[in-house]
Amino acid sequence: MFTSDFKTEPYWWDAVPREPAEPYDIPAKVDVLIVGSGYTGLHAALKTARAGRSTLVLDAQQIGYGASSRNGGQISNSIKLNLLELTKKFGTDMAAKISIEGKASRDYIESFVKEEGLDCNFKVVGRFDGAHTPKQYEKLAKTAGEDGSFMVPLADQHSELGTDFYYGGIVRPNHASIHPALYHRGLLSLVRQAGAGVGGNCKVTSIKFQNNGYLVETPTQSVQAKRVIIATNGYTTKVTPELQKRVIPIGSYIIATEELPKDVMDRLMPKNRMLCDTRKMVFYYRPSPDRKRILFGGRVSLNESDPVATAKPLRNELIRIFPELKKVKISHSWSGFVAFTFDKLMHVGRQKEMYYAMGYCGSGVGMASYLGMKIGLMAADDATGQTAFSEIPFLGRLYYQGNPWFMGPTISYYRLHDRLSL
C-alpha cells in the first residue's frame, strides 16, 4: 500500500522543508506580538510591520508547522452559509456584507500573490462539486448561476471528472488552487523583509494584561507588548481560554498517491479542477500542481488518529471514486487541525488590546489571509481593517470547554446520513 519512501508528513514539505530549529533572540518590548506563524499571523505581521510597528511573531512549533503548510491548497469563496441562511440569521444588510467579504477574501489572495510576485502555483482552476445522490444534484441546481457556477449533468460528467461515482455536479469557476507551503514561504520572506521578527519553537505560556499592555511569557523569557494578536485557529489552547471555548479543532487527514501516468491523470482529472462532493462526510481532492499525483483528504475516523492508520481508509475512499486506482500506492499521509465554530462562520474581535481572527471552518487559505490582513490593519489603527466578521457575536456553548467530546457521535450521524442518501 505504501511506497518505499513513504512519509508521514505533508507532500508540500518536499518542496519546502521545515526551517531548522535555531535559537531566536526575543526582544524585551514590542508594539505588537503575534501568537501563531500561519497565514493569519503572517498577514497581520506584514501590515503592522509595514505600518512602522515593531512586530514579533512567535510559534510553539517550527514556523508554519500547522495548517498553513498542511492544507489541501483549495481556495474558495469561504462562506459555508448561503445568502438565504445568512439573511435568516442576521438580516438582509449583514447577510449581504458577510457574503461580499467571502468573495473579497478570494479576490484578496489573488491580488496579493500577483502584486507581491509570489511563486506559489496560484491558479484559478474552478472547483467541481459532485452530487452523491440525484436529490443532491437537484439541490445544487438551485444554486446554479451564483458567481458564474453551472451544472454538469451525469451524461457530461466525464468532461470534468473521470468517475461514475456521482450523479453529475456543479462547477464553481472562480475557485482557485495554490501550493500552500510555497505560499507560506513567500509570505514569511515578505514579513521578514518588512522588519518583523519571527521565532519558532517558542511557546507562549501565558498572556497577562497589565499597564495598558500585555506581559507575554515564554519558557525562557518575558516580552512586554502594547498589543497582542491571537492567530492560532485550530491550534488555540488554554492560554486564551475564552477563545478556546469558541472554536472546535477537527483533525483533517490527507494522502498523496505515488506518481501516476499522464494519460491516467488526464482521464481522471481532465480540467485540473479542485474537487469536492455533497456528502456530510466531505472528501476533498485535487491533482498535485505538477499533475503527477492525486492529493485526497477528509475525515475517516471517529476520533483523532495517526496518519499511518488513516492512510488505508482514505485510500479506500479514493478507490471508491476511481476504481482503476485499486493498485495505487501512497507516498505521503499527514494530518492537521482546522477550526470550526458553532455558527459555521469565521470571527474577528478585540478584547482590550488583544485582537483575534479564527474559526475558518475549512476555508482557511483565503479567509485566514484576508482576515489576518484585517486584524493587522486594526492593530495598526487603520480604519480599513473594519470587517463584518467583527460585528457578529462569537458564541460558544455551555456544554463545551474546548474538548470536542461530541465529534464521535456527530461523525457517526454523518456517516448514517450519507449511507441513507438523505
Image: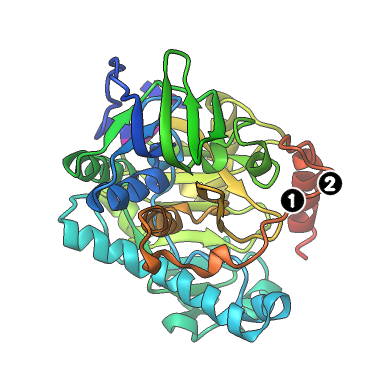
Name which residue lies at 47% across and 45% down: 296
Q: Write down the residue under mark 1.
A: 396
Magenta segment, principal secondary structure?
loop
Number of residues whose C-alpha sits closer than 10 Å to that of mark 1, classed few (under 14), some (14–19) or many (20 or more): some
Residue 400, can we see it? yes
Asked if residue 15 lies in the magenta stretch, the reply is no
Amino acid found under the numbered disc labelled 2:
Leu
The residue nearer to you, when weighing 85 against 296, is 85
Nearer to the camera, 242 or 116: 242
Quarter placement of the C terminus: bottom right
- Left or right: 274, with 179 as reference point: right
Q: Is residue 252 visible?
A: no
Residue 275 in picture, x, y percent from top left: 46, 59
SS category of the residue bearing label 1: loop
Residue most extreme to the right: 399
The residue located at (31%, 25%) in the rendering is 27
Name the mark on residue 398. 2
C-alpha separation, residue under disc 2 versus residue under disc 1: 7 Å
- The segment highlighted magenta reads 8-12
Q: Nearer the viewer, residue 44 or 158?
A: 44
Estimate the x, y position of residue 281 in percent, counting from the top left.
Answer: 66, 52
Image x and y of residue 39, in percent: 38, 46
Q: Position of residue 45 (x, y in %)?
A: 33, 45
